[in-house]
Amino acid sequence: VSTQSTGTQLTQVMLRATILVSPALARRFCARAAAPVNVAIVAHVDHGKTTLVDCMLKHCNEDHGDRAMDSMNQERERGITIMSKVTSMAANNVRFNVVDTPGHADFGGEVERVMGMVDGVVLLVDATEGPMPQTKFVVSKALSAGLNLVAVLNKVDRETSDCTRVENELFDLLVDLGATDEQLDFPFLYASAKQGWCSLSADERTETMGPLFDTIAQHIKPADYSEAAKHPFQMLASMMEYDTFLGRILTGKISSGAARVNDQVHALDMDGNVVDKGRITKIQAPRGLSREVLEIGSVGDIVMVAGLSKATVSHTISHQELTTGLPAPQIDPCLLYTSPSPRDS
C-alpha cells in the first residue's frame, strides 16, 4: 500500500471517529446545510407548550431537564411562561428555530410580537378541554399573519380525552376566524408531552417526537430568501433583553442581507425616524439552551444582536443606507371592564 493511500485511509478513519465521538458537532454541521424553519409553539395556558419543547429538545439530544425554557425566577416559582424565548435544535438534517410563547392572556403581547418572526405555528390543544379563549386569540393572530399551522392534540393518554370532538371544534374555530383554504388544510397530530411521544394517529403510540419534526418540515416551509439575500441587512427587533457585559440585546429574524460584526447600523421606528446609531459588537444564535457566537448572521435566521443602547422592540435594525423601517405587528390595546350599578348604600 502506498504512503498516499495509507494517509487517505487514516484521514477517513479520523473523520469517522470525530463524528462518532462528537454527535453534537455532526448535528450542527448537518443543520447548517439547510435553511432553518422558524416555528412558534402557541396554546392556551396549561395545555403543555413548555413540556412539549422539553420533549423536542430531548429528541434532538439537547435534554436540559423539565421546563428548561422557563428561565426566569417568577416563571419557575409560578409554573407559567411569561416571556417568549427562542431555542434551536436539529433533526433530519433540518434546523428548527422554536419559539416558546406564554399562554396567559396577560402576556398576549409576547405572542403577537413573534408572529412576524416565524414561518408557521404549532397549535397545541388539550384533547379534553378543546379550544379555549386564549386558543382563539393565538389562532386569530396566526391566521391574520398568513401563517400555516400544525395542530397537536396533547394529553391524549388521559381517559377523558375526546379527539374527534376537539378536532371538529378546532376546525370550526378556524372557519369562524376566516382561515383560507390553504390554512384549513392543516394536519392533526396526537401527543403526550408528559410521556414524551407524538404520533400520526390517535390510536397509535410511538416512543419519540419524530412525527412532529417530520410534519413541521413537510407543512411549514421557510420563505425564499434568494432575492432578499442580495439587499442590505435589515431585521425587525421582536424581543429585548439586557446583559451585564454586552448591554442591550435585540432578537429578531434577519429579513434581508447579512449581519456582520462591526457593521455600522441604525435603528428606525415605524415612521422611518432614526432613534439610535452604532455598530454591531456581537452576534449570537440560539443552539439548544446555549448560544453560539457568529461572525455573520444569514438571512432568514433568528439571531441576537448587541451594540445599540436605545433601540427596542418594534424598531428596525438595518444598514445606515436604508431609511425605511419594517412594518411591526400591532399590539391589541388593553381593555378595562367595568360594571356600573346604582348606589344603594
Image (cartoon, grey):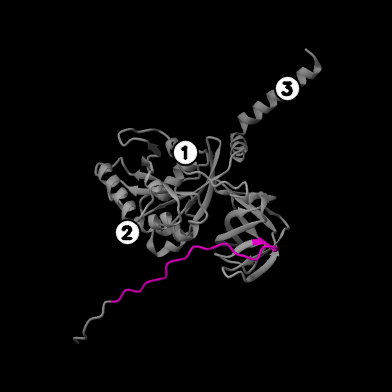
Residue 187 sits above or below residue 299 on the image: above
Which comes sooner in the sequence, label 2 or label 3? Answer: 3
Q: Marks 2 and 3, how far apart in space?
A: 62 Å
> Residue 238: which quarter of the image?
bottom right
**Tag in front: 1 or 2:** 1
**Tag in front: 2 or 3:** 2
Q: Marks 3 and 1, how far apart in space?
A: 39 Å
* Residue 50 location (% of width, % of height): 43, 50
* Residue 344 location (% of width, % of height): 18, 86
Label 1's element?
helix
Question: Mark 1: few, some, or many residues within 10 Å (few <14, many ≥20)?
Answer: few
* Residue 235 location (% of width, % of height): 60, 58
Part of the protein shown in magenta:
318-338
Residue 337 visible somewhere in the drawing: yes
What residue does disc 2 label?
Answer: 133
For this view, does 70 lie left or right of residue 33? left
Residue 243 visible somewhere in the drawing: no
**Label of residue 134 in the image:** none
Helix, strand or loop: magenta stretch: loop
What residue does disc 1 label?
Answer: 218
Q: Marks 1 and 2, how far apart in space?
A: 29 Å
Residue type, mark 1 in image? Gln
Residue visible at 49% across and 62% down in the picture: 329
What residue does disc 3 label?
Answer: 10
For this view, does 52 lie left or right of residue 26? left
Residue type, mark 2 in image? Pro
Label 3's element?
helix
Magenta stretch encompasses residue 336? yes
